[in-house]
Every structure is written in C-alpha cells, then in structure tokens.
Image: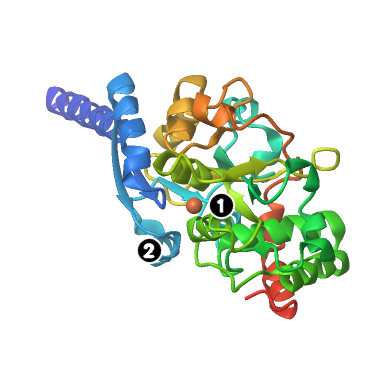
Amino acid sequence: MLLIIRLFLITSLTLVSLFSTAQAEEVVVYSARNEQLIKPLFDAYTKETGVQIKFITDKEGPLMQRLKVEGANTPADLLLTVDAGNLWQAAQEGLLKPVQSKVLSSNIRGYLRDPGNQWFGLSVRARTLVYNTQKLKPNELSTYEDLANPKWKGRLCLRTSKKVYNQSLVAMMIAEHGEAKTEQIVRGWIANLATDVFPDDTKMMEAIAAGQCDVGIVNTYYFGRLIEKSPKLPLALFWPNQSANGVHVNVSGAGVTKYAKHEQAAIKLLEWLSSKNAQNLFADVNLEYPVNPLVKPDPVVAAWGSFKQNPINVAKAGELQTAAVKLMDRAGYK
Ligand code: FE
C-alpha cells in the first residue's frame, strides 16, 4: 500500500514537473504588429531558447476587446501593440499586470516605459517634419510650434487627427505647453493647411513631393518605405525642436496580460526583446529606432541623422489623449 502511495506521489510529482516544463516552453502573444514584423523575431527566439511562441495578429481595438471578453480564460500572455496611447489604454482597462524586472528597466530608457511597469516600449518611432527639398531650405524650419506661424499659410499638409499618432503628438504638446497654448498652435496649423487632411502619412508625403504643400509631420519609417520605393522624390526629414525639448517620439511595445498563464516565460521573452541581440531585429525590420541605448539604428535609419528625443514620458500620450482629441475637435482639426 505504502509503495503504491509512494509511486502515486512520484507519478504526480513527475506530472507536475512535466506540466510546468510544458508551460514554460510556450508563450502566447496577441499582436497588433504585423506578422511580417514579428515572425522573424519569434523564430529567432524559438531557435535560441526552444520556447514556442503562438501568436495571433489583428488591429489593437479587436485584440483589446478580445482580452476583455476572455477575461481570466484568455490564452494570451503578452499584448504587443503600437503607440503609447494604446498601451496606456490597455493598462487603464485592467488588461495588463505590472512586471518588476531589472533587465527591462536597465535595457529600456525610462521615458519609453510605463512608470507603473505595466508596459514597455520595444521600438521608438519618431514623428518629425518632412519637407519638399525643391521648395524650401532646412534652415527655414525650426519647430512643430513654428508650423502655426502665418508664414506657412497654404504650405502645410497634415494627416487626419483621427489617427492615434497625431493624438499622441498633441497630447505630448499639452503635457509640455498646457492646453491653452497647444490649442493656439493647433489652430495655427489648421489655418495654414494647403488642403484637406490626409488618411495616412504616405499620401501626405506624396502631396508634399508633388508640390501641393511644402512641409508636413510624419513617422520616419513611412518616409523610409516611400524613399526606398521612389528614391528620386524631392523629400527630406528635418529634426525639429533640437534647441528646445526634442523630437516627439512614441513607441511600439508590450505588456504581460493580467491573466497570463505563462507569466515568467512572457517576462523572459519581453526581456529578450529589449536585449542587444533582439533590438536590431525588432527596430530595423520596420526602420524604427531601438529603445536600448546601447544599440545603434539600422544604417538606412542612421543616415537620416541623429537627433535629441523629447524625454517626457510617453505615458502622457495616453493620460492626455482624451484632452487632445477634444482640443483638436475644438480647433477644427478634422
Ligand atoms: Fe504606423
């Protein structure tokens, strides 16, 4: 009898350890970042560690909705998405859990992660100025705020305010200047528009290249993609606010879900994504900048020049998003 009990105990212990090994060998990711951007990275991780990564990709809205509906039953361990505004929203809705990790806090610059440790930037996207090189000299440009100056009347193009990138930009301006001054600036931009707002950054750049306007605001990776396709376009990037607060940056990033079944494995994957080896894979594939200060950007990206980043914590993009949306509406920014 005793032997049977002992055997049973051994068997169940073995089962338990088998079970935990099986658990540790898998991470489930919900990703708003495209498959083509994450798959090579996940494959590299599996090759290096043996850990399998299962993932689904969708837009951030449906993914967050799914997490909410699944609640404690969700299979997801990690939510990966773009824009601090979205990451902040996920944390706000209780979909993520705080992670204490010395690796993450040393690998990722402080202003690129949640002060409450619920999400972490993994790549930096700079939202900067782009201009037509046949229509103006770079020394005519200076700051985002200056684009409200009447000297730019009929010369400015903007993407729609419906896109979270512009909501985040304006939210960060509110963090810096307060609402009243930011509203004045946004009203100035609208007064200077050459034409209706554009549905995306690429169409806006094409309008600038075609001479419909002289200058606009763009995420640099869209510039990189367009120039790769059409290298002769008369377009160049400009780094604004360099003698002031710096260029507006945002992140793509991730957080461990509140009900993660493979929490430790998810944290390990996050840590790896922020490491020197993975950072280039993560950033370069989309022509973005690493969050890890020890890692250099891709040569194509580096050729656009180095610049000072605005060091206000990107969480402000979330905290002030509602205020930004209302402000843009008041200012007539469609
Ligand atoms: Fe984008």
Q: Total of numbered circles in the picture?
A: 2
Amino acid type at circle 1 is Asp
For disc 2, the marked residue is: 66
Ligand 1 lies under 8 Å from the Cβ of mark 1: no
Q: Please name whichever residue, 278 or 10, is drawn nearer the observer in this view of the structure.
A: 278
Q: Is residue 39 above or below residue 21?
A: below
Q: Position of residue 92 (x, y in %)?
A: 60, 60
Mark 2–mark 1 Cα distance, whole angstroms, equals: 19 Å
Residue at horizontal 30 percent and vertical 51 percent from the top: 56
Give the quarter of the figure containing the C terminus.
bottom right
Q: Is residue 272 above or below residue 59?
A: above
Q: Please name whichever residue, 27 or 38, is drawn nearer the observer in this view of the structure.
A: 38
Q: Given contact means CB atoms under 8 Å apart, are the residues at marks 2 and 1 in contact?
A: no
Q: Which mark is residue 292?
A: none
Q: Viewed as shown, does residue 219 lie left or right of 315?
A: left
For disc 1, the marked residue is: 83
Q: Please name whichever residue, 181 or 305, is drawn nearer the observer in this view of the structure.
A: 305
Residue at horizontal 44 percent and vertical 43 percent from the top: 225
- Residue 168 visible: yes
Q: Position of residue 128 (x, y in %)?
A: 66, 47
Q: Earlier in the sequence, mark 2 or mark 1?
A: 2
Q: Residues within 10 Å of mark 2 (few under 14, many from 20)?
A: some
Circle 1 SS class: loop
Give the quarter of the figure containing the N terminus.
top left
Amino acid type at circle 2 is Arg
Residue at horizontal 83 percent and vertical 54 percent from the top: 176
Residue at horizontal 83 percent and vertical 66 percent from the top: 150
Q: Position of residue 78 (x, y in %)?
A: 43, 45
Circle 2 SS class: helix
The picture quadrant where one finds residue 230 is top left
